[in-house]
Amino acid sequence: MIRYILVRLGMGVVTVWGAVTAVFLALHAVPGGPASIILQGGAGGGDVNPAAVAALEQELGLDRPLMVQYVTYLGDLLGGDLGDSIKYSAPVSEIIAAPFGNTAILVVIAIIIGCLVGISFGVLSGNWPGSVLDRVLSGLLSVAVSTPGFVIAIFLSLFIGLRLGWFPSLGYRPPEEGFGPFLYHAFLPSLALSFGFLALVGRVARTSILSVRREDWVRTARGMGLSRGRVFRRHVFRNAINPVVTVSGLQLGGLLGATVLVEQVFNWPGVGSTLLNAINGRDYPLVQGIVIVFAVVFILTNLLVDLMYRFLDPRVEG
């Protein structure tokens, strides 16, 4: 087990390094250079003063050799320094701290909703395949997985928020004003995020349960007189949950990406909105910092999923 953890940790470190390097090289491959694009205010902003470009490159350290910039950047990252925002003239880590917490709340709630609803749908469909209930639930999951997240977000905001008035259709309450109002405003954005996730979880859970139920040892357990419920709890569910854990971890990246549009629909001040504003404002250090944080969170989550998979199924080899 220790060897397995060390191998996965080593792979995680290498993957994080690869993601950081890819982000660094991508931003330095911008035609004309980042400094020129920043001064233009966009890709088609026209010509800029070469002296101004040179001054900004010197201020940002872009006039140094690429390898020197790369080594300096890695050293800063190891020290926890993501750089300074051009637009806000403040450390990137300070700018994204609060929005990242807001987004994390949405993602966590979405995962909870997705797992509870998705696994429940998968269990019901998998235990009664071909029934009316199975066809209805499978149809609902198909609709959920094929509908874009921003369409679901707009529908929830207009129908549940504005028409029914059950939850706020827009806005945000900081946690300092009470965690209850904060969660009340966070529910609809989280629900919109959860649809695609719960659909995938439900379909994987159904398929996995059907596969495990066909195993010989399940039929043997039933033949020994064990009740259907006990066989499911003790044998089927535990063996069928592993693929669900895997797909849940892999979908974290999709949830983080979906927050960009969902937060715009609900006017939620999260890191997705911050990323979109940074892209529009050509704030490259801020864009770079957010992308790296996304990549690190995604990689660490997949590392955790690997470890959970080994815990759930000791037969997995390191």
Image (tube, rainbow, N blue to C red):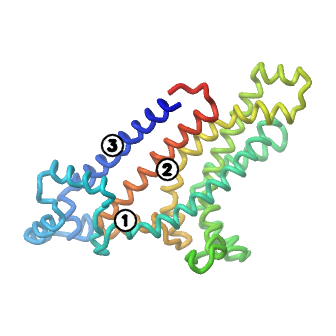
Q: Position of residue 316 (x, y in %)?
A: 57, 27
Residue 205, position as x, y percentages in the image: 69, 39
At x 20%, y 54%, the residue is 72
What is the number of callouts on the image? Answer: 3
In the rendered view, tell whether residue 114 sits above or below residue 244. below
Mark sitting earlier along the chain (1/2): 1
Precedes in sequence: disc 2 or disc 3: 3
Give the percent coordinates (x, y) of residue 60. Answer: 18, 65
Q: Residue at x 18, y 54 (%)?
A: 69
Task: Indicate left or right for 209 with 5 as reference.
Answer: right
Residue at far bottom of view: 177
Give the image quarter of residue 113.
bottom right
Tell me the quarter of the picture where residue 187 sits: bottom right
Q: Which mark is residue 253?
A: 2
Q: Residues within 10 Å of mark 1 (few under 14, many from 20)?
A: some
Q: Which residue is mark 1?
A: 93
Q: CA distance from mark 3 to mark 1?
A: 21 Å
| Residue 79 picture location, percent across and down | 30, 56
Give the distance between the C-alpha atoms of the residues marked 1 and 2, in whole angstroms.
20 Å
Task: Give me the residue at 58% from left, 77% from top.
Answer: 173
Q: In the rendering, which numbered label is found on residue 18?
A: 3
